[in-house]
Image (cartoon, rainbow, N blue to C red):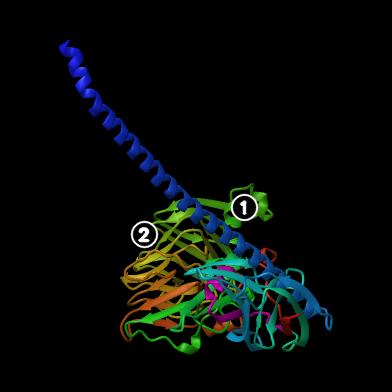
Amino acid sequence: MSWRREEKSDAPGRAESTLLGLILLIGMVAVVGSSMVLVADDSLTSVQRQAEHERIESGFVELSQQMATASSAGDNSRALNLETDQDGAVVMTDTGHINITGGDVNKSVPIGAIEYQDDDGTTIAYQAGSVFRETGNQTRIVSAPPIEYDVESETLSFPITEVRDETRLGSGDVVVDHYETDPLGGSSLVENDTVTIEVTSKYYRGWERFFEEQGGATTVRDVEVHDDRTGTVTAEFGYQEVSDAFKTGAIYATDLEVQGGAEIDDSLTQKVAYPPLTDEVNRLVNATRAPKDTFEGTDITRLDTVDEHNDSLEDGIYVTDGIEESGHLEFDLSDGNATLVVDGDINANDETITVSDHENDHELSVYLTGDYDAKNGGNTCVTEAGCYTNEDATVIQLVASDESEIDFGPGGKSRFEGVIYAGGTNEDWTERNGCDKQVCIHSNPNFFGSIIASSVEIQGGKGSIDFEYDTQLQDEGVGIYPDPSLLPPQLTYLNIAEHTVDVREK
C-alpha cells in the first residue's frame, strides 16, 4: 500500500516535468527551425547574387567581343542586350594609361573603362579589351586582354580598344559603333630588343595576373601601388639576340645593384634580358653520355670529379662531375678549341681553370649545370702573360644554367678573365653573405671581360672592385651557342593599334 501511495504522490510532478520538457522541446525546435530558415535565406541570397554576377560577367564578355568586332568591321554597328541591375554600368574615358616601349616604339595610350559595381563591393569592369572581376583585394580575369604572339612572323600584336565618351548604360539594349582607328605607326621593328608594357590602372592586379599567366612570374618586372589605389604593372617580353652578347658592356642584367661605394661605369652596364641557355647546357651533358660518334669522331675524355692538377689538356671534349677546391684544369689550345662540360659545381680556389697557350683565336667553352663558387678566391684566366695581366677575354667562355649561382669573394682575391653567360630572368636565389642575386661580387675580385645574368649585385668599398670590360669582345663573334635552332622564339615586330568606339544605350 505504501508503494502505491508513493506512486500516486509522484504522478503530478512527473506530469509537470513531462509537460515542461515538451514545451522546451517545442521551443528548441522553433529556434532551430528559425535559424535554419535564416541560414537558408542567407544561402539563397548568396546563390542568387553569385548567379547575378555570372550573368553580368557574360554580358561584359559579349560587350568586349562586340567592341572588338566593331573595331575591325569599320562602320557596321553592333547591338547586344547588357543585362545589369537597376544601377546599370558607367562608361569612363580616362582611368589609366598603357605605355609600350621597344625598338623604335615609344607609345603612351590613355585607357578608359566600363564598370559595374554591386552593393557587396564586387566590381565587374571592361578595360582595353579585357574583363576583370574584383572583390576587395582579389581580382579574377574573366576575359584576357587581346595580346597575341604569332610564332611564324615573330610579331607581338596588341589592339587597344577604347571608349570615346563618358555615359551611363542602363540594363537593356546597347549599341557599339566604330569611331576611328589609329595604327600608331603600324608594325614596328623591335628585333634584338625587348618590349616593355607598362599598365597604370585601378585594375592593376588583374593585369599583373594576366602577364604572369602569359609569360611566367618573371615577365612582371615591377608592381608599384599608388596612393589613389591605382597601380602600375611593368611587364617585359622578348630577349636580346645571343649573337649580340658581350659586344657593348661589362654587365647585362635585368636586376643590377651596386652597394657600399663600389664603382662601376654606368656606360658599361645594361638592364636587358638575354635568353637562358639551360637547354643547350643539358643537351651537351646528355650528348657526352652517348657514343663517341655523337661529335663526329671527336674523342670525349671523362675526368670524373677533378680534385687535382690536370695539365696540358689539349683540343677536344672533356666531361667531369665537378671541380673541387684543390682541382685545377690547364688547357693548351695551340692546336684547336676545347670544350669542358661540368655536370655539377665548380669550387674555385687558387688556379682552377687556366689556358697556358692559345693560337689562331682558339677558345675554351665551359658548360656548367651547377654553381660557380669563388667565395674564397680562385682563378679562371689566360696565363701566358700571368694570370693577373689582362690579356684576352675572348678565350674562355663559361655558359651556365639559368639556375646556377655565381660567387666572387668575399674571401681571397678571385680572378676571372673571360665571359660568363647565365641568361634568363629567374628571381629566386639563395642569400649568400647578404646577397640574394644570381651573381654576387664581393670585395677584392679582379674581373676582365663581360657578364650576362638575370641579376647581379656588387658589394664593396670604393676602389675594392677591379672590373674592366675587354673591348676585344666588340669585334669577336663569341661562339657560345653551337645550335641556334634551339633558341627560344625571338620578337621581331610589334603591332599596336588604338581603336575608339562609341558605346551607348539604344
Q: Quadrant of the N terminus?
A: top left
Position of 8 with respect to 249 (left or right) is left
Q: Which residue is mark 1?
A: 287
| Label 2: few (<14), some (14–19) or many (≥20) C-alpha neighbours in 10 Å | many
Residue 448, compared with residue 19, is above or below; it is: below
Looking at the picture, which amino acid does disc 2 mark?
Glu
Quarter-of-image position of residue 444: bottom left
Determine which residue is flagged by label 2: 325
Residue occupying the point 68% across, 84% down = 163
In the rendered image, residue 277, in percent from the top left (x then y), is placed at 58, 65
- Packing grade of label 1 (10 A; few <14, some 14-19, many >=20) is few
The spot of residue 333 in percent (x, y) is: 55, 67
Magenta residue span:
189-210
Could you tell me residue 173's position as x and y percent? Answer: 74, 75
Tag 1: amino acid:
Ala
Mark identifier at residue 260: none
Closer-to-camera residue (273/114): 114
Q: Earlier in the sequence, mark 2 or mark 1?
A: 1
Q: CA distance from mark 2 to mark 1?
A: 27 Å
